[in-house]
């Protein structure tokens, strides 16, 4: 058995855990990250693509923004496609200059991992049987085993950055936590391909066959999604079947311009809205997907995770440097205000763009009416744009 001490034990080396580790390190606070998977597995997971300005600002503040600034694609608009035509939402004009950056979660994760290893900081990968204890008292600890050895880490705080399926939220007694959940009756089938994107901006499509999204990772790598059944078998989807389905859901010009090829990744993601309240339990804090999940339609998941990490890092720094509990005492309330607003936007945009198998023709007619109103009304377009670029921290 081995036993040691740290100030903050971070569970999970996804983007939330890695960014928290980096921000604490820059403030001189000691943290260890404990991750269940291998470093390779974590760095190769294909997920988010769109970063809000608050997220890019935070990555720059954390000292990991250089490659993102060089390689990220700055977008000042996107298109909504319905009834066979595309309509542009001009983010820059509608929000007074706000923009988003297309830079993959894999790249963010790699930049954070590189900074962590350059600073010689400890991340335990492939930790087994991770367990957290005594977080409702003053001396919490984390236990895990690796290579047949049991390890104990005593700490001041535990940061639960271990995603939706993690151990931290599951360790909270059910009387202390309330959860809210909606599982949507469909999934997203995603394909990554080394071909230039069909358009230099994202296209979100509402079609009677279902939702489709054209996104990208660079000028030579594209990411596409089509709505599929919740229990879809991925083997059924050859590359050709995917391209045919995507083409059918786009406007004729985009369908014509689409450059296809052999997929380099193909996966199905379920869609869910989920929020756990509160996000603090004594000396345990939940952050990111451990506390909330949004459907990916609004591109909010990673951004929301980083906004939790921003609040949590500031709260912990305040505690360790000024002995002030103000930040940690307000952590849950401050995060949840933003979480619910982003959850609302993601739920709304998902409801507007997808086929709902049980809701019949009236749902689609109402969606089309709303989309027409949305692109025709400056007030409605502004509401959409200001949510998409990310709400400010003080609202
Ligand atoms: P993660 O990424 O799930 O990382 C959690 C880490 O914890 C580890 N873990 C454990 N470690 C130790 N012990 C245990 N018992 C553990 N259990 C789990 C896991 O192995 C993992 O490494 O959570 P985190 O860090 O909070 O990050 C959240 C984001 O990954 C997520 O919100 C986004 O990917 C969501 N998302 C998007 N977000 C955006 O902001 N913009 C987007 O464009 C966007 N697109 C997406 C998305 C998510 C998608 N999927 C697959 C759900 C598109 C898709 C298709
Ligand atoms: C992506 O590129 O993976 C992506 C982009 C926008 C979204 C969701 C996912 O809304």
Image: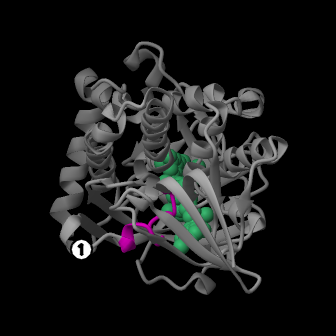
Displayed quadrant of residue 350: bottom left
The overriding secondary structure of the stretch rendered in magenta is loop
Q: Is residue 219 left or right of residue 105?
A: right
- Measured as percent of width and height from the top left, residue 64 is found at 71, 33
Q: Judge left or right: residue 70 versus residue 371.
A: right
Front in this rendered view, residue 168 or 324:
324
- For the residue pair 171 and 388, the one nearer the viewer reads as 171
Residue 80: x %, y % from top left: 42, 41
Q: Which residue appears farthest toward the left when viewing the image?
A: 362
Could you tell me if residue 209 is visible in this image? no
The colour scheme is: one colour
- The image quadrant that residue 292 belongs to is bottom left
Q: Say which residue appears at 51% left-offset and 44% top-offset.
A: 203
Write down the residue under mark 1. Answer: 174
The residue sitting at 38% across, 56% down in the picture is 138
Q: Where is residue 322 shown, x and y percent of the image?
A: 45, 26
Q: Could you say where residue 147 lies in the image, as x and y percent from the top left?
A: 77, 82
Q: Is residue 167 magenta?
A: yes
Q: Residue at x 51, y 48 (%)?
A: 302
Residue found at the very far top of the displayed protein: 96
Of residue 104 and residue 175, the one placed in the foreground of this image is 175
Task: Work out which quarter of the rendered image holds the C terminus and state it.
Answer: top left
Q: Where are the magenta residues, as a range?
A: 160-171
Q: Is residue 303 above or below residue 258?
A: above
Q: Residue at x 62, y 32 (%)?
A: 59
Q: Which one is nearer the viewer's eye here, 132 or 246?
A: 132
Q: Is residue 50 visible?
A: yes
Residue 91 is covered by the magenta coloring: no
* Total marks placed: 1
The N terminus, quarter of image? bottom right
Circle 1 sits in a helix, a strand or a loop, which is it? Answer: helix
């Amino acid at each position: 058995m081995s036993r040691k001490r740290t100030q903050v034990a971070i569970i999970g080396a996804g983007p939330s855990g890695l960014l928290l580790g980096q921000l604490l390190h820059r403030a001189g606070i000691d943290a260890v990250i404990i991750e269940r998977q291998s470093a390779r597995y974590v760095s190769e997971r294909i997920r988010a693509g769109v970063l809000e300005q608050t997220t890019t600002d935070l990555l720059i503040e954390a000292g990991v923004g250089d490659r993102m600034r060089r390689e990220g694609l700055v977008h000042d608009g996107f298109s909504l496609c319905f009834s066979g035509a595309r309509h542009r939402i001009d983010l820059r004009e509608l929000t007074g200059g706000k923009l988003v950056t297309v830079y993959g979660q894999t790249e963010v994760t790699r930049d954070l991992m590189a900074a962590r290893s350059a600073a010689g900081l400890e991340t335990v990968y492939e930790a087994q049987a991770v367990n957290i204890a005594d977080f409702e008292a003053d001396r919490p600890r984390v236990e895990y085993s690796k290579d047949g050895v049991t390890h104990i880490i005593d700490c001041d705080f535990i940061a639960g950055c271990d995603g939706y399926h993690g151990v931290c939220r599951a360790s909270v007694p059910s009387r202390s936590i309330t959860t809210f959940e909606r599982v949507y009756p469909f999934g997203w089938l995603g394909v990554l391909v080394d071909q230039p994107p069909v358009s230099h901006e994202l296209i979100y499509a509402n079609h009677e066959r279902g939702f489709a999204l054209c996104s990208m990772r660079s000028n030579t790598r594209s990411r596409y999604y089509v709505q599929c059944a919740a229990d879809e078998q991925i083997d059924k989807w050859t590359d050709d079947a995917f391209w045919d389905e995507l083409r059918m859901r786009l406007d004729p010009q985009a369908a014509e311009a689409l450059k296809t090829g052999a997929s380099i990744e193909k996966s199905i993601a379920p869609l869910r809205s989920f929020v756990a309240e509160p996000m603090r339990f004594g000396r345990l804090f939940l952050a990111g997907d451990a506390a909330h999940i949004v459907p990916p339609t609004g591109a909010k998941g990673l951004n929301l995770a980083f906004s939790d990490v921003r609040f949590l890092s500031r709260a912990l720094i305040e505690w360790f440097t000024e002995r002030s509990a103000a930040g940690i005492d307000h952590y849950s309330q401050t995060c949840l205000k933003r979480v619910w607003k982003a959850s609302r936007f993601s739920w709304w945009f998902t409801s507007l763009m997808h086929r709902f198998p049980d809701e019949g023709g009236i749902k689609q007619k109402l969606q089309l009416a709303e989309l027409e109103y949305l692109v025709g009304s400056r007030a409605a377009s502004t509401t959409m744009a200001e949510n998409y670029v990310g709400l400010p921290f003080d609202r």
